[in-house]
Image (spheres, grey):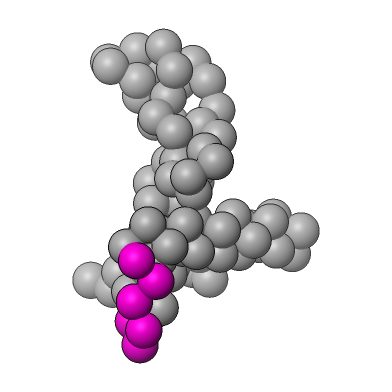
Amino acid sequence: MNTPTIDMLLLTDVEMQAARKQVEKMAYFKWKNAGSPENNSLTFWNTAELEWIEYFYVPNRNCRGRPRCDTPTLSDSGGAELLRC
């Protein structure tokens, strides 16, 4: 099975553009927090992309066994904040 990417998702053009901006921000913060290493930006992008899919796209996400109760947001450090329940 292929690793999912945002390009595989059913998003409108506007949603795709917003998703890419969020993934870019998340990847940047991950890269910066890792000490700005050279030659592996794709690793940070892939990690951020998967995190975005898991926390922002996955439908019917449950929170501690209860129905989804809040929409996750992008934190200032670039990571997806967990659902607040």
Residue 47 percent location from the top left of the image: 34, 62
Q: Is residue 51 above or below residue 1?
A: above
Magenta highlight on residue 39: yes
| Residue 61 sits inside the magenta stretch | no
Give the x, y percent position of residue 5: 43, 68
Q: Which residue appears at 38% of the width and 51% of the height?
A: 51
- Residue at position x 37%, y 57% from top? 33
User: For the stretch drawn in magenta, what is the main secondary structure?
Assistant: loop
What percent of the width, then of the height, locates residue 80? 45, 41
The segment highlighted magenta reads 35-40
**Between 35 and 73, the one nearer to me in the picture:** 35
Specify the farthest residue to the bottom: 39
Question: Would you say 22 lies left or right of 31 here?
Answer: right
Q: Is residue 70 left or right of residue 18?
A: left
Instruction: Give the vertical position of 53 relative to 8 (above or below).
Output: above
Q: Where on the picture, by quarter, is residue 68? A: top left
19 or 29, which lies in front? 29
Residue at image coords 70%, 63%? 17
Q: Do we see residue 59 in this rendering?
A: no
Q: Is residue 82 above or below residue 84?
A: below
Q: Residue at x 28, y 16 (%)?
A: 64
27 displayed left or right of 2:
right
Tell me where residue 76 appears, x and y as whole percent: 54, 41
